[in-house]
Amino acid sequence: MNTIGRHFIVEASRCNPDVLNDIDRIESILVEAARQANATVVTSTFHHFYPQGVSGVVVVSESHLAIHTWPEKGYAALDIYTCGDTTDPQKAVDYVVNSLGAKEVVETFVLRGVEQSDAFTHVMTTSQEREDEGEKLAVVL
């Protein structure tokens, strides 16, 4: 299937709140995630909210990685989109959720820009992984 890009929309729950509220650490995690995915970092910008929370984006030649955190809820919303076939956005997702200490992850994967005659569409799948008492459970929804 020909596609322009691959897009991950991630709900990361039960994360380490100290990490979620550390702007320098969040930026470092996203920049390294871009590198893990073999993406080329162009620039990044991050903002720390009062009293808590971080939002930021890493612009890569192949598109972007973005995050919004809610430390008080142990939650992060992650958006990773890459174009072309030289990157592996799943590696970026895995790196970020592991670095945040997420115990529950819902990933929606979207193939974007799928050609259908003279128009474009997308194809989407969702999966959930939850860690309870050291046991990982995975479900495709």
Image: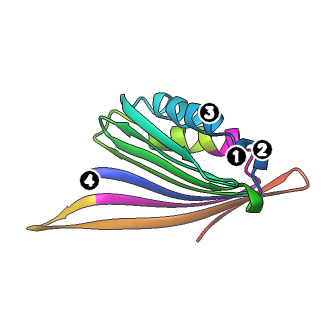
- On the image, the x and y values in percent for residue 39 come to 39, 31
Q: CA distance from mark 3 to mark 4?
A: 34 Å
Residue carrying label 2: 18
- Residue at image coords 38%, 32%: 43
- Please report contact status of discs 1 and 2: CB closer than 8 Å, yes or no: yes
- Residue at image coords 77%, 44%: 18
Residue carrying label 4: 3
Tell me which segment is drawn in magenta: 97-112
Residue carrying label 3: 24
Please say if 30 is above or below 7. Answer: above
Queried whether the magenta region covers residue 84, the answer comes back as no
Can the viewer see residue 16? no
Q: CA distance from mark 2 to mark 4?
A: 38 Å
Is 31 or 44 nearer to us in this picture?
A: 44
Numbered badge on residue 21? 1
Quarter residue 130 falls in: bottom right
- Please report contact status of discs 2 and 4: CB closer than 8 Å, yes or no: no
- On the image, the x and y values in percent for residue 65 come to 45, 45
Q: CA distance from mark 3 to mark 2?
A: 12 Å
Q: CA distance from mark 1 to mark 2?
A: 5 Å
Which is more foreground, mark 3 or mark 4? Answer: 3
Is 65 or 114 nearer to us in this picture?
A: 65
Q: Could you tell me the amino acid type at mark 3?
A: Asp
- On the image, the x and y values in percent for residue 17 come to 77, 50
Q: Could you tell me the amino acid type at mark 1?
A: Asn
> Reading the chain from its start, which is encountered first: label 3 or label 2?
2
- Please report contact status of discs 3 and 4: CB closer than 8 Å, yes or no: no
Secondary structure at badge 4 equals loop
Queried whether the magenta region covers residue 98, the answer comes back as yes
- Please report contact status of discs 1 and 3: CB closer than 8 Å, yes or no: no
